[in-house]
Image (cartoon, grey):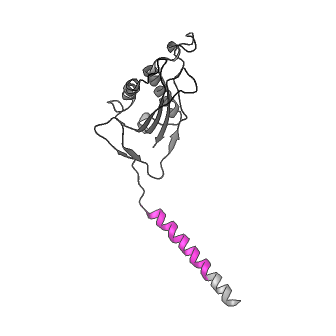
Amino acid sequence: MKKINILILGLLISMISCTVSTETKKESEPKEEFIVRYDRPDASILRGVYIPKGKEYFYTSGLVAPIKDESAPVGSIERYGNTYEQSLGTLKRIKETIAEAGFTLEDVFFLRVYLAPDQEGNIDWNAWFKAYGEYFNNEENPNKVARSTIAVYALANPDLLIEIEAVAAK
């Protein structure tokens, strides 16, 4: 019985010493401090982004453009605007939404974009790319993001042509 107690005591001391050693090691390890953006100089978006431990994150839900003209009939392009106008409205909403949590567009590192066809069945990729350039990768905000842009059959509201999810970190 005495041998078992000594064995158990030895194991407990060993476990405590390993725990203390591991905790001390974790505290003394240098922390990564910078978000690393893997650039593609020839493109308006990044190849990827590395976010080190200890950063704060903010995720938006899929955001859409506000109604541009409430008096316009449902189903008309005038109600929400074309892809370019909706893209600008959605990016503005993202900017406002993340600002509520103390983030800026410079903190955004990822966008997931869903584009739907207009009434003629066309997806206006260039309208989205132009609007993106007014918010990112420009003189005011040189930040580029990692991004996926996906064509979809339709969004939940058939009047909407774009929906965007954003992720920010600082």
Q: Residue furthest bottom?
A: 2
117 vs 33, nearest the viewer: 117
The answer to whether residue 126 is above or below residue 165 is above
Q: Is residue 156 above or below residue 75?
A: below
Q: Which residues are magenta?
A: 10-34
Up/down of 78 relative to 147, above or below = above
Q: Position of residue 89 (x, y in %)?
A: 48, 23
Q: Position of residue 128 (x, y in %)?
A: 41, 26
- Quarter-of-image position of residue 139: top left
Q: Nearer the viewer, residue 155 or 47?
A: 155
Q: Which residue in the rendered view is the most extreme toward the front? A: 121
Q: Position of residue 141 (x, y in %)?
A: 36, 32
- What main secondary structure does the magenta stretch of the protein show? helix
Tell me: 7 left or right of 89.
right
Q: Residue at x 58, y 14 (%)?
A: 74
Q: Is residue 53 above or below residue 57?
A: below
Q: Residue furthest left?
A: 42
Please tell me how many numbered marks the rendered image carries: 0
Which quadrant would residue 11 be assigned to in this image?
bottom right
* Residue beneath the point at 52% across and 66% down: 23
Q: Nearer the viewer, residue 29 or 166?
A: 166
Q: Position of residue 170 (x, y in %)?
A: 45, 43
148 relative to 139 in the view: left or right: right
Magenta stretch encompasses residue 21: yes
Q: Quadrant of the N terminus?
A: bottom right
Residue 18 is covered by the magenta coloring: yes
Residue occupying the point 55% across, 70% down:
19
* Residue at 52% across, 31% down: 97
